[in-house]
Amino acid sequence: MESNTDMTKIQHEIISDFMLFDDWMEKYEYIIDLGKDLPLINEKYKTDEYIIEGCQSKVWLHAALIDGKMDYSADSDAIITKGIIGLLIRVMNHQTPEEIASSDLFFISEIGLQEHLSPSRSNGLVGMVKKMKIEAIKSLNQ
Amino acid sequence: MQIPPFNVREIREQFPALRQKIYGKNLIYFDNGATSQKPQVVIDAINRYYAVENANIHRGVHYLSQRATTEFEASRIRIQKHLNARKSEEIIFTKGTTDSINLVAFSYGELLNKGDEIIISAMEHHGNIVPWQMLCARKGLVLKVIPINTKGEIIQEEYDRLLSNKTKLVSVIHISNTLGTVNPVKEMIKKAHAVGAKFLLDGAQSIQHMKIDVADLDCDFYVFSGHKVFGPTGIGVLYGKEALLDAMPPYQGGGDMIEKVTFEKTTYNHLPHKFEAGTPHIAGGICLGTAFEFLSTIDLIESEAYERELAHYAEQVLETFEDLTIIGTAKNKTSVVSFNVKGLHPFDIGTLLDKQGIAVRTGHHCTQPLMDFYKIPGTVRASFAFYNTKEEIDFFAEALEKSINILR
């Protein structure tokens, strides 16, 4: 299948990165480092307009269509959430809306982070992935 | 019966959940405020009920039905005795604390009139806030909130000021699920009675941590959940004084709660069945009795002292951490230690503790107004039961230090 090639490739890269870690704490250290390193969102978008409320942590998401590709930036008040956002953006950023709308984010469960994207976790990430896809679908219809 | 001396190792052996490893680490269970683990006797009772005792109660002429009815009612008596209630009719089985409070809010609420006042405190769980807000909206009542000080103690002078002859009910948490504060409820009950108000004591966090004597406390209602006191989920209790329960209209209609039904007129069953419409949680009711049987083998005076010591020890250990703030520093406190580390999100700390085998709760603990009072989004909460140990607290401290170092 032609579509999703890039996203599939990036997801496989992330999976092999995570295979280097022996235990959970190492995985989380890596995620936390990602969270620390990434300046993810322009401060002017860290407002209520862009917030996705979670019971545990908050997420801010900004999406735009630039030259036919989606441009995402996001942030969270929790560093682990921020690190996972970094991974999601690495996969979805600068992809076409079509690819994003039909994407399967299989890397999440492959690297063992599915708990963070389960509806019960209520950390804003579930809402964020949904919003990323909705924004892609919206720009398809523009 | 002779109660054996308190021995944490022997108690731990009765809890199979505590013997497991998660993520390859020994489980350290510090989320007892959310729910307690179950002793083997309760697990066995649940199995036995469904294996050989299962039948509907209060209606069958056959052997199993009568046996289940006898056990269900025996459990009610056991709970009555444990609480030192005058009559077993005063023990109503519900789904849990929240269900019990909703029952009172609906049923006792029917006896109240526009302008009547209900008092709660600023440290209440949502389960002891929202039912009253709903009642107030329905009946035009006024909800008043007693403020707390920064240590997390109810300001008694403010309580005195709020009480008046308009006050019809005071509903307060016995032990705060977020702060661990043990409220001076016996005095507060006396004060409520002095103005003619009834008092509901939310025992969700006290039934498992101390000996409860409703006659001595003189509360009008005492409510708790079975699952926090080593019993099954989905079952709980409303204790109410008989005269009061008698005066209250039924909450839900259906089978079991009726005396006679015709299309013209239905008469209601007597207590406790008046408040137990439909088939109850029979297994839950019977096995909650087993949980209290288990509790009767523990010296609750000693276990309470032990739990206070655990909480105190945890506080001492946490105080050695830089930039760590303990939320809730009441003089009278037990079983719960809530804290925040400067610059770090409780969710991050909780996630890393989990990966090291330690179960804590993070977030607002269903007390959002309390979080607003402290101007924090949430806390990390370690809550203890009498099967926890100081060694576990030492492991927890090491894991916390490791977590902080990674997050910084």
Image (tube, coloured by chain):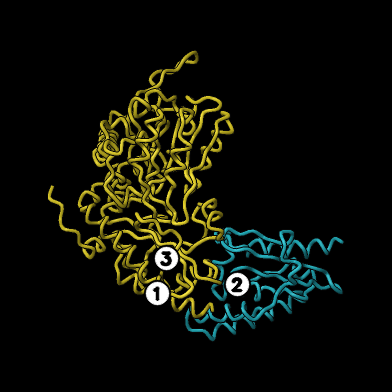
Chain colours: A cyan, B yellow
The answer to whether marks 2 and 1 sit on the same chain is no
Q: Secondary structure at mark 2?
A: helix
**Marks 2 and 3: CB-CB under 8 Å?**
no
Q: Residue at x 53, y 77 (%)?
A: B407
Residue type, numbered disc 2: Ile
Q: Which mark is residue B320?
A: 1
Position in image of residue A43 (x %, y %): 73, 70
Residue type, numbered disc 3: Ala
Position in image of residue A90 (x %, y %): 69, 77
The answer to whether residue A122 of the structure is visible from this angle is: yes
Most distant residue in the top direction? B264
Q: Nearer the viewer, residue A43 or B392?
A: A43
The answer to whether residue B64 of the structure is visible from this angle is: no
Q: Which residue is mark 2?
A: A108
Q: Which residue is mark 3?
A: B359
Residue B241 located left or right of residue B179: left
Q: Chain of mark 3?
A: B
Q: Is residue B221 above or below residue B45?
A: above
